[in-house]
Image (spheres, rainbow, N blue to C red):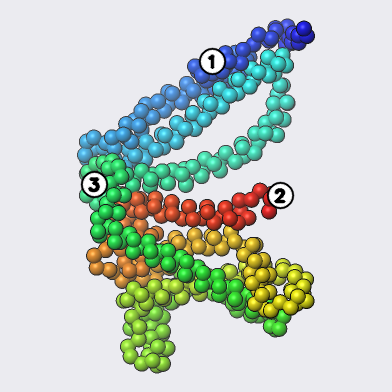
Amino acid sequence: MYSAPHTKDENGHRFKNHHPALAMTLSILFAGLGQLYNRRWMKGLLFILLEVSFIYEFGYDIQLGFWGIATLGEIPGLDDSIQLLVFGIFMIILLVFAIGLYIFNIVDARKQAILLKENGKLPGLKEALRAFYDKGFPYFITLPGLILLIFVVVFPLIFSLTLAFTNYNLYHSPPRHLVDWVGFSNFKQLFSEDVWSNSFFDVLSWTIVWTIVATTMQIVLGLFLAVIVNDKRIKLKKTIRTILILPWAVPAFVSILIFKAMFNDGFGAINNDIIIPLFGGKGLPWLLDPFYTKLALIMIQTWLGFPFLFALFSGVLQSASQEWYEAADVDGGSKWQKFRYITLPHVLYATAPLLITQYAGNFNNFNIIYLFNNGKPAVEGQYAGGTDILISWVYKLTFDNNQYGMAATVTIIMGLFISIIAFFQFRHTRAFKEEGQI
């Protein structure tokens, strides 16, 4: 029976009986021991130094972090529940990083032991650097961005998530008072108590209507104008395109404030210069009646949003092949048929992901709601204004009413809602298709 020849390193030591399982076990017991067993002295000492330093520096802090998250403090006036919660989340994230590095140490020890047993020697420095450049360099370059993303995005997200399960509000505000874990009490209160449930469902329904109607209108207007301007019979195309894109050049908050003055019930130009001279009466209550305020908001958002979509659709239409339309003319296709079966599919196929982001953006379009009328007018028996959408209501719950726990609860529901819809829409577009499957 054939047996592989014994392999030796430069010193004549045999590695036929080298045990990867032992190397892995040693690294489990203490980071770096497996590397020392594999005779990777520098790497082993580095792992040992890292683990000793981590335990010495953060061992007590991690215990304090877990205690803080579990109890949120025990002595009012001395323990700050929110600081303890933030510190605990930070320690958990740090521990996750440490566990990841610890797992890497175990995997590395096992792989190196297998290579040592099979080849009789480990790669040299040049070979190790070359392997790192080929396989690990992209991860090394993206690591700082990943760390920044975790502490800028993931950390606040986890903090908001945890607040939804506390009673953090004006009456349970540290350091004078402690914050307590209340489980799903906020969710139950949001859906069961009349004031909260009426406010939530009214705001949710208006948010959905606002998102669909306002976004669809700006898409339709942008596409309509792009198709018209792209027509061969239209002259001065560059001038017309420049004029239609001008609203995009004006900062949105400036346009919103101008429209706020124009729609003012008392001195606004819409009532005094248009509606009253044409129809008489006292004009329309644009800022006092929720229906007319919503109507004004939709019209303003259509004005603000169509220039970008007009420019987008214009570029896509110019890329459409004229042979498609010539073939349709030969087949006797009408203008509507050419638009329906050629223009519209071509435009939607190329811009679907961007159109989905338009809907997602308007779902969280805080600026126009806040600047135009701050979500007003007020509605009797509700915590939200007549034109508040979810994001503006969360702002009010946080900064005006100090209902931090409830604001976090609404934020979670809002995030889940928009994430599910966006993911479902993206799955049906080109965005998630692999190369070669488009």
Q: Residue at x 35, y 83 (%)?
A: 284
Query: In the rendered image, which residue does mark 3 sit on?
Result: 172
Q: Is residue 390 above or below residue 9?
A: below
Q: Is residue 277 left or right of residue 351?
A: left
Q: Nearest to the eye among marks 2 and 1: give it.
A: 2
**In the rendered image, is residue 160 in sight?**
yes
Instruction: Please report whichever mark, 2 or 1, sits nearer to the chain's N-terminal start.
Output: 1
Name the N-terminal-most of marks 2 and 3.
3
Helix, strand or loop under label 2: loop
Residue type, label 3: His
Q: Nearer the viewer, residue 1 or 389?
A: 1
Question: Which corner quadrant of the image does residue 35 belong to?
Answer: top right
Label 2 crowding class (10 Å Cα cut-off): few <14, some 14-19, many 20+?
A: few
Residue at image mark 2? 436
Above or below, comparing residue 71 to residue 256 in the picture: above
Cα gap from disc 1 to disc 3, whole angstroms: 49 Å
Q: Which residue is mark 1?
A: 26
Number of marks: 3
- Per the image, label 3 sits on a secondary structure element best described as loop
